Every structure is written in C-alpha cells, then in structure tokens.
Amino acid sequence: MTHTQTQIKSRFLRAVNRLPVDTTPIWLMRQAGRYMAEYRALREKYTILEMIKSPELACEVTLQPIKAFDLDAAIIFADILPPLEGMGLSLEFVKGEGPVLHNPLRTAEDVERLRVLPPEETLHFTLDAIRLARTELDMRGIPLIGFSGAPYTLASYAIEGGGSRNHARVKALMMNEPQIWQRLMNKLSTVVGQYLKTQAAAGAQVLQLFDSWVGQLSPYDYQQYVLPYTQKAIAIAKQADVPIIHFGTGTAGMLELIKEAGGEVIGLDWRIPLGEAWRRLGDDVAIQGNLDPITLLADWDALRQRAQYVLDEAAGKVGHIFNLGHGILPQTPVDNVRRLVDFVHEYQATK
Amino acid sequence: MTHTQTQIKSRFLRAVNRLPVDTTPIWLMRQAGRYMAEYRALREKYTILEMIKSPELACEVTLQPIKAFDLDAAIIFADILPPLEGMGLSLEFVKGEGPVLHNPLRTAEDVERLRVLPPEETLHFTLDAIRLARTELDMRGIPLIGFSGAPYTLASYAIEGGGSRNHARVKALMMNEPQIWQRLMNKLSTVVGQYLKTQAAAGAQVLQLFDSWVGQLSPYDYQQYVLPYTQKAIAIAKQADVPIIHFGTGTAGMLELIKEAGGEVIGLDWRIPLGEAWRRLGDDVAIQGNLDPITLLADWDALRQRAQYVLDEAAGKVGHIFNLGHGILPQTPVDNVRRLVDFVHEYQATK
C-alpha cells in the first residue's frame, strides 16, 4: 500500500483501490436523469446535446443527484456518443427513438473519412464541465467519474446508425470486412483512449468505459475482433494513472475476457450472482454492481430484500461498489433512490 | 442403455438421448420461416395465425425446410403464444410490430379470469398438425419436435401486452404482487405442461420449452419466482416420457439453475463458449447450440470458421445437437443455410 493510498478518504475511491471502507459506497448509473424533477425542469428548456455542450449546465446536472442523495461519487453529465460527432458523424437525440447517426458508416471510404482529433478540440465542453464540477465536488469531498463509450459500442452505433435489436450490420462488417473493421477499431480505440486520458487530466478521478453492447457478441468474436481494441483504449487511458471501471451488460459468459481488457474495476449487470462473478474474476479486481434497475420500481420491501442480497453476495470482500446493473429508469420513484442509498450505507455499517 | 435406446436410428434422437452418433445432428430454430421463398409464397396468401390454425398448412410449412435441406429434425410450425389465446387473451401478429395481446393482464381479476382448458379444446389445430406431419416425416426417418413458450416468457407477453425492452411491468408485478404472480404462474405452468404432454401424445418425439426471455431476470428472481413453475411445467410434460429441450437466451449467469428445471437437453445462446457451458452443466445433460444467428449473414469463410469453432468446443462429447443460439433471421441467404447444414455433417465425419 503506497503512502498516497493510505491517505484516500473517499470511500468510493478506497473501494476502487481495494482498500477497506467504513461502509459500502454507492452511485447509480444515469443518476442524473429524467427520474429527477430538477433534471426534467432543465430538459424542458434545453435539448440533451445543449446540456452536454454547456459546461455550466452539464456541471449543474452532474451535481443534482449529489445534492439530493447521499451518493459516494458523481459522474460527469455527458453521453457515450459525442466522440462519434467529433469524428465526423452527425448525431441527434430523437424524441422517443433515442440517438440517431444521420450518416452511418457503410463503406471503407466512410471509415477513412473519420477524423482522429485531439479531445481538446472536439470534446472541450465535457473537459470544461469536468473542471467546473471538480471545484464544486471537492468542497463536498465527492470524487468525479469521467467516462466514454467503448470501441465496440461506438462502432455499433456508428454502423447501425442508432440503437439496434440484433446488431446485424455491425457484426456483418466485423465478420466480412476484417481490414475495414481493423481500421475503424484502431481509430475508435485511439479516440476513446485519448478522451479518457484527457478527462483524467481535466480532473476526473476515476474513468468508466461503457461497453454497453459487448454482450451481444459471442466470446469468440469478442476475443478476436474487440478485446485488442478495448485493451488499446484502456492502455492509452492508463497513461493518466487513474483507475478504470469496465462496465458491460450480458457479459456473464465472458467475464474472464472482460478482465483481460485491463480495468481495475469490473462493472456487472444483474444477470449473474455478484459472488459467483467475483469468484471467477479473482480478488485482484474490484466489483461494481449489480442490482436490476427494475427493482427500483418495486415496493420498498421487495427492493430492500434484493439490495440486501447484493450486499450479502459481497460480504467479506474488499472493493465492492454498489450500483445498478444498468442505467436508472426514467419512471423510477425518487423516494426509492433515497431509501436505497441510505440502506446500502446503513446495512453494511451494522454488520 | 435400454433395448429401446439401442434401436434409435435418428442421429438427432440419439444425441438427445446422449448416445453415440455418426455425425453431429443439426436443426435450426425458426427453420421454417421468412428466409425461405416457399414460406414467403404462403405468407402472401395467409396470416401467421391462419397458417398455424390450419393443420394442413402448418404441416406443409413444417416440411418446407426438411425438403430443402439435410436437417436432422423438424419442428412443428406453430408459435409460443397461442396458449395465451386459449386462456382468453386476444392475440394478433401486427405487421412490423410483432405479437400484440390486446387485453393484457393488469389486475388480480384479469388473472382470475384466465381459463385453464384441455389443449385438445384450445390448441387442437397444432395437435392435428403434429399428427399429419408425423406421417410425412416417418417416411423420411426425420423426428418431430413439439414446443411451447415457458411460463415466464408467456407471463411477460401477457402482462406487457407484447414484446418489451426492459420487462418493467412483468417484473414489477412479480416483485410487488407475489400472490397474484403465484396464481398466474400456476395457471401458466399447468397450461404449458399439459400442452407439451398432449403434443407428445399426438406424436411429437421431443419437446422444446422456449424460455426466451428468462435471461432478463436476475438469478435471484429466477430461482425464487420462476424456477418452481418451469419445474412444474416440465414435470407435467415428462408424464409423456419424451425428452425435453430447455432453451433460453442470456442464461450464462444461471445455467446451473436452468439445469434444475429438469430438461434433458440445455439449449444455449451464443454468449458463452459451448465447452465452458458444458463443463459447468456436467455430462448428464445434452447440449444444443450455439452459433450466433447473425453468422448466417456472413460470407462462407467467416461462417464456416465460426461453425467449426462450435463443433470443436463440443469435440469428444456425446450429446451435441448443433443449432443457432436463437431463431434464424428473415434476411438469411438460403445458400448459407444449405452449406452450414452440410458442413456440420461433413466436418464431424472427417474427424
């Protein structure tokens, strides 16, 4: 244990570094979101991209859940897709439909045209938001997480042109055009890695890589066509010397490969018991997760019982960060969020 | 090994019973479907429900892929949802949208109203189609699979009113209303079990339970709120003394619980290496799977390489049935299906 590590006070940063904590830290993916009235009030005035691109608004939204709940970490308000905009794709959030890329990648020429520019040039708004938010958060003793979409998830959006049920286009390109794929993934992993590294330089104390769609792949395809690029992105980000949380959904069949990508913390969805995942991954990683987000729509008794199960699965382990297995849903009652956060802190403290 | 077992000639039935085979048997989920011109020609004249409810048409469609390819098993042309229609829900297949239940379950009274009637009364068309198809298939030496949706998958459609992205309604009812849930699942498991058993009596030689959405659940919720009812459905079906294939997607985090449901064959999706799944499940089950259906959209080299990987993962094992990890996609080229079927037979034979 280094001198620096013993001085870490934040229980979130302690857990990330696998140091003992007074009680389990908790934050929630998409904790700044539509379930909060404060957020909806701002969204009436601004589009999502306007909020992301205004450092002041992004900072304000980042702080909303921190002010409302006893959360142990903030995550910068941004989205996984703006890096694609910086590369030359035309991004829009369409009401009721989600993100749309108006000029999706289809040919080798499309991939050639993609720009790899410094994040300071294309994503300066999020870097500025991080600087602003750090000042506010330091006063509260709350650390800030930066993040990016992972190369496969970005490739999927860029090729499909938006969300996709079965990822047919992205997989077909990956399987049939290995050279175009390699060129694309090299560009994406450079952009993602540099973006993460620059976020750390701007003040993010932990970085999360959202490999949201990677569970759509067979482990065979993940290992051959994706893992090398996730490794590359993480290796670049690590030049900043801050820990990486590597989150994916549907990864229960390939956790060992996810670990090979190099994250210090593995983020789980709810489809595997946390204890079993940790046994497979080993004690040299921290674990983040893994309550089904739907549980927050349930009555308190049902919610408490399942939160307790997650905590019991992590009993005796060092390095557990409580979270949902995916983003919080818009229809989530605020009161359930408050009770969950407090329960996680109190339950562990009484043991 | 019983006297009966040594007399089994079909390599599909031999693999299901974990007997040695000359080469790996193969069939494909949704093998009778829109990717075939013969199927599309019929669909121009009839709706899906008209085709399912006409034993002659259902028999004809069942045989289409058997005539076109060297497949080792037929599956009766039907759908997982007609059992819900028999219980009193109003089912329609809406173009571009998929199945819709016009009167979804929302209250205790809705669940009370659900009828549990003999399959001979509500699903006689599929039983008749099975009788017709058996006659045709026996001449070709090809066995016939009957099937049903599993209780959770049916509950999900019945409560959500159709397909669902996050299963919020069905899970909220499950978590908040355990008594209504129990009543519903008891009815569904009775209907599913009896339907499967009656299909076997009509001539189906193997039964597949489609637990298609069960991977949306945490293992905790599956074990407490679903597994007992899947066990009940399978126990009723087993009174017919034919083997059960239990198929689910997204189950890599809870294969051991899936095994507890009682199927002789476990059907895998593509999200876990087949060999690793089999190690976890043990040699007392047969395994069906597990090629990503998207692979059939790829060039032959990419397809062959991944099919070979699946076969190599099963090398030396007794009881492998080659299949996709989910249903075949409508845009699949027919020629890829033909080449895959022949490759699976030839690859094993040369080893």
Image (cartoon, coloured by chain):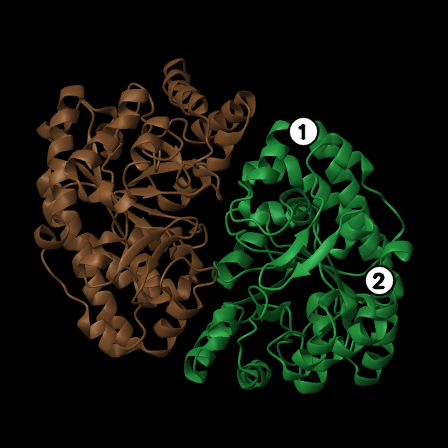
Chain colours: A green, B brown
For the C terminus of chain B, the image quarter is top left
* Residue marked by disc 2: A200
Q: Residue at x 35, y 62 (%)?
A: B156
Asked whether residue B243 appears in the rendered view, the answer is yes
Q: How far separated are the C-alphas under marks 2 and 1?
A: 32 Å
Q: Residue at x 63, y 68 (%)?
A: A29
The three-letter code of the residue at mark 1 reads: Pro
Along the horizontal axis of the image, is B99 left or right of A259?
A: left
Residue B99 against residue B332 in the figure, above or below: below
* Residue marked by disc 1: A178
Mark 2 Cα shell of 10 Å, populated few (<14), some (14-19), many (≥20): many
First in sequence: mark 2 vs mark 1? 1
Asked whether residue B204 appears in the rendered view, the answer is no
Q: Residue A218: horizontal and vertical position, in percent?
A: 53, 40
State the image quarter where residue B172 is shown.
bottom left
Chain containing the residue with disc 2: A
